[in-house]
Image (tube, rainbow, N blue to C red):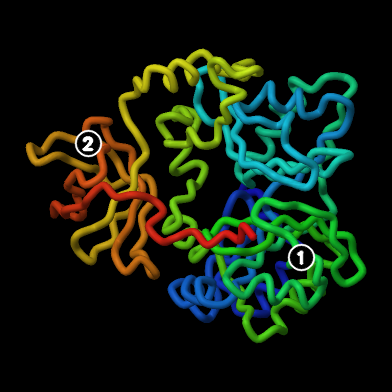
Amino acid sequence: MNQALLTTPLHALHVDAGAKMVPFAGYDMPVQYKLGVKKEHLHTRELAGLFDVSHMGQLRLKGEGAAQFLESLVPVDIVDLPVGNQRYAFFTNEQGGIMDDLMVANLGDHLFIVVNAACKTQDIAHIKQHLPAQLELEVVQDRALLAIQGPHAANVLSRLNSAVSDMVFMDVARIELLGAECIVSRSGYTGEDGFEISVPSDKAEELAQQLLAQAEVEWVGLGARDSLRLECGLCLYGHDLDPTTTPVEASLLWGIQKVRRVGGERAGGFPGADIILSQIETKNVGRKRVGLVGETKAPVREGTELFNADGQKIGVVTSGTAGPTAGVPVSMAYLSVEYAELGTSVLAEVRGKMLAMTVAKMPFVPQRYYRG
């Protein structure tokens, strides 16, 4: 018997807005609205899109030494993360593979962590398995999560509280919106300027309606969320990242600060450290995550196999889209390292045809985060 799908506190609003609902990570989620995926994508790039991301896991880690503990599970600098900032991180396993990617914010009296919906049960168990007695992990059940993204996002949100306009990319703060204390970060998953807002569930609908009442804002579903993040070179867990892929193979070296690498004062000490640190030092990996741009108009989707000119298989596509803003089909793929150089030509097998693609720099569309 199929388990009933979970719903977010905003489910009724999506249905009222005529959303096409689909099962996603155990939730009934909007994949698109009446505008359609392409127009929602372009609207976000031009004005402001509103996303319900309440299916994500929200966690609070409290107690003396919380940052040191979290560092034992991720290859990322958490100890030096300033109060009022957040950082991208990933849990690793003993083989150096990525168990999930996540955001960690330092709110002073606790670490606020957002994990992927499909991984949250596993992530909570993983943290609890290692949790020292003096620390407390709270799974937040009474808050929704909204993202407002796009060049007009700051104007829109500052009408509700002007304090948000003082924030820059990766800042996080407790900010009052409509009389409720929200946790607001200036970040997102589209490559655009924008904010993610953790709001009490009983205020979520009112906040969404206040934002949607502003002329610049439209609902945006999972379909456009996927094409937006892909154009900006951002990974989707379970597609571009998985437990068999190391951060080095995934081209996520920028996420591992020097302090956690060989020679750093807190080098290693996380699962799979020997493998990951060795890969960083030797650059010895067999495959790398790369960007690909199509030379035809056909989108090259996830699962498409990639070949060299001699017909040898050299990789596989993990994400692909028509590239509404880029104007060309764009994909992410894992390629054998000898083919991972920028400008290398590869062939994608799409419905029996070999389509030419070129290894290209990511992001495919410039990121426009607000850095002040």
- Give the label, 2 or 1, closer to the camera: 1
Q: Which disc, if any, is residue 164?
A: 1
Which residue does the image show at 49% across and 64% down from the upper left? 223
Above or below, 141 relative to 365: above
Which residue does the image show at 85% across and 38% down from the upper left? 110
Name, please, the residue furthest toward the top. Answer: 274
Depth check: give the residue in front, 243 or 102: 102
| Relative horizontal placement of residue 177, taking residue 221 as reference (left or right) | right
Depth check: give the residue in front, 282 or 354: 282
Depth check: give the residue in front, 354 or 368: 368
Residues at circles 2 and 1 in contact by the CB criterion of under 8 Å:
no
Name, please, the residue furthest toward the bottom. Answer: 215
| Relative horizontal placement of residue 241, taking residue 90 as reference (left or right) | left
**Is label 1 in a helix, a strand or a loop?**
helix
Which residue does the image show at 49% across and 41% down from the upper left? 238
Residue 183 falls in image quadrant: bottom right
Picture coordinates of residue 344 (x, y %)? 19, 44
Residue 355 falls in image quadrant: bottom left
Mark 2 residue type: Tyr
Q: Which disc, if any, is residue 339?
A: 2
Mark 1 residue type: Val
Depth check: give the residue in front, 51 or 154: 154
Q: Does residue 200 appear in this view?
A: no
Q: Quadrant of the C terminus?
A: bottom right
Sequence-first tag of 2 and 1: 1
